[in-house]
Amino acid sequence: MQFSLAHQLVSFLGALLILIAYIGHQLHKMNPRGTMYNWLNAIGSAILGWMALHPFQLGFVILEFVWVVVSMYGWYAGMQERRAALVAIETRN
């Protein structure tokens, strides 16, 4: 199956975003509860999920959908933790 250059470049961008997050985490440069880590994962997997719709590839669509949901949950949970830490600091003062 032949894919256009644009399709390949967009897929590469999605994979690159996920890999940046992964490498950043492995090198202790990104917190897995952090905003950047989770948004890179969510955007990258959303791109790859969209690309898996054309042509339709059920396994990849499910994988990328779950990846987006888990990434957004991680971002939300990290945001809640940071908010709770700020409230704790404010109540001590």
Image: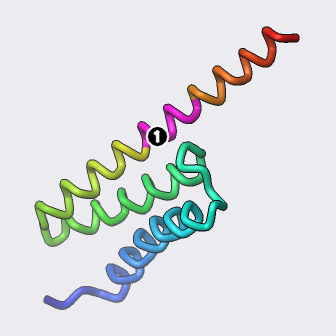
Q: Quadrant of residue 58?
A: bottom left
User: Residue 76 lies in magenta, yes or no?
Assistant: yes
Of 89 and 69, nearer the camera is: 89
User: Residue 68 lies in magenta, yes or no?
Assistant: no
Colour scheme in use: rainbow
- Answer with left or right where residue 57 lies relative to residue 25: left
Residue marked by disc 1: 74
The residue lying at 41 percent from left, 72 percent from top is 15
- Disc 1 residue type? Gly
Magenta: main secondary structure equals helix
**Quadrant of the rendering where the N terminus is positioned:** bottom left
Q: Position of residue 73 (x, y in %)?
A: 42, 37
Of 41 and 49, nearer the camera is: 41
Element class at badge 1:
helix
- Residue extent of the magenta highlight: 72-79
The residue lying at 55 percent from left, 43 percent from top is 33
Q: Position of residue 75 (x, y in %)?
A: 51, 40
Question: Measured along the vertical axis of the image, is residue 38 above or below residue 77?
Answer: below
